[in-house]
Amino acid sequence: MTSIGPRPTVSVVVPCYKYGQYVQQTVTSILRNERVDIDVLVIDDCSPDDSWEVVQALPRFDTRVRVVRNERNQGLIATANDGLDQAEGDYVVLLSADDALAPGWLDRGVDLLERTPHATFVKGPVRVFEGPHLPTLRKQRDLRSVVWPGRDWIAKSCDQGVTDVRSPEVIVRTSAQRQAGGYNPKVPYSSDMEMWLRLASLGDVIEVTGPVSAFYRFHPSNMSRGKDLLGVGELDSNDDAFDEWYAGAGSRVEGADELLKRAHRALAVMAVARAPRAFLEDPPMFQRLCEFALEKDLLWAAPQVAKLRQRLTSPLAVRARDRLTPLTEAVVQTRRKVPHLRARAGAYTAWVNDRLGTADHDATGTKARHMNGEGR
């Protein structure tokens, strides 16, 4: 650290619901930092399995770990907000009990925040994986960082139609978290995205490249839970996050009206880009995507949607789609099986590595986790 005096303290809040098989690995990963003081709070959200038994044992291994159990299941947003209210460190991290931090990330990230007092949070590279073992970290690039003025980072996110943040890779300045407030239950499927926009409205954002900062675990069973995340549902969730950010924090950002329009344009573009595939696989979704694009940006989307409808709904196109339907359905079914097959392959790889005496292995994948109810 560049400063002289007491070491910075990082409070790490770990909500846990039915993740007893992972939580010890998660907590161990947090403690692998040497230049910051660490305070870990694990909150079991009234898990119906044996997770609480596992969580209860954690303080026996390290006194820096505190554990609490909710009397009733509150859902992730309420549990996360309760934990953030109890965070006493200079910095705070919200880490799901199935994810993990890379060695030294808290040291590196806090050092950058200490040297950048106007930054509200720092984010680093994430390794997505699946299976019981964390990936092996081989040779990595040197650490580089870029400081984005908050408005510029929001503008970038608006132009993308999404924030490029998963969640475990973020370290937040606690004073900024207090000012921003807790996670918004009005946007249960994108409350984390709305939070990053809100924090960026209060200060700068540090983006880091180089060494992996966190591990994000993918569960095949978590795909598209309660929302159509491969169609218009994901776009609806992103739109909700932008609208809630604008309503709550837009007044802090110069030109917020224009930024919101840019977000709506980006979402309309994404909807139109998804429409041709939906025409082949799910005709009703094709119509929903077209309607979404028109709703978000009528001026831009009207000619685009007209061209799509003219080209794709012609008798010739419909006959071609109907003839391709058996093949299309086979492709869709195969794609749905891929996460399961990948998970089985990852489990087999882990078994082989264990037999060879190496516990870790590489794996990749994607995950959709929603900050609502019991599903995490």
Image: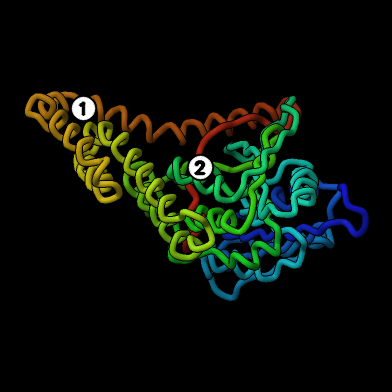
Residue 129 location, x and y as percent? 59, 37
Q: Residues within 10 Å of mark 2 (few under 14, many from 20)?
A: some
- SS for dot 2: helix
Determine the residue positioned at 79% across, 51% down. 114
Q: Nearer the viewer, residue 260 or 354?
A: 260
Q: Which SS class for mark 1? A: helix
Please identify the quarter of the rendering in which residue 39 is found: bottom right
Nearest to the eye among marks 2 and 1: give it.
2
Q: Local crowd at mark 1 within 10 Å, few (<14), some, or many (≥20)? A: few
Of 370 and 171, nearer the camera is: 171
The residue sitting at the front extreme is: 254
Identify the residue shown where x is 26% and y is 43%. Answer: 289
Q: Is residue 231 left or right of residue 14?
A: left
Residue 241 pos. (x, y %): 44, 56
Say whether residue 288 is visible.
no
Most distant residue in the bottom direction: 71
- Position above or below: 219 against 92: above
Per the rendering, the mark at residue 156 is 2
Per the rendering, the mark at residue 200 is: none
Left or right position of 365 against 85: left
Instruction: Kindly identify the residue that appears in the image at 49 percent across and 63 percent down.
Output: 251
Query: Taking 344 as reference, is 31 above or below it?
Result: below
- Residue in the image at 49% along x and 58% along y: 191
Name the residue type under label 2: Lys
Q: Amino acid at mark 1?
A: Pro
Q: Position of residue 70 (x, y in %)?
A: 61, 72
Rendered view: 19 above or below 141? below
Q: Closer to the camera, 24 or 240?
A: 240
> What residue would you read off at disc 1?
326
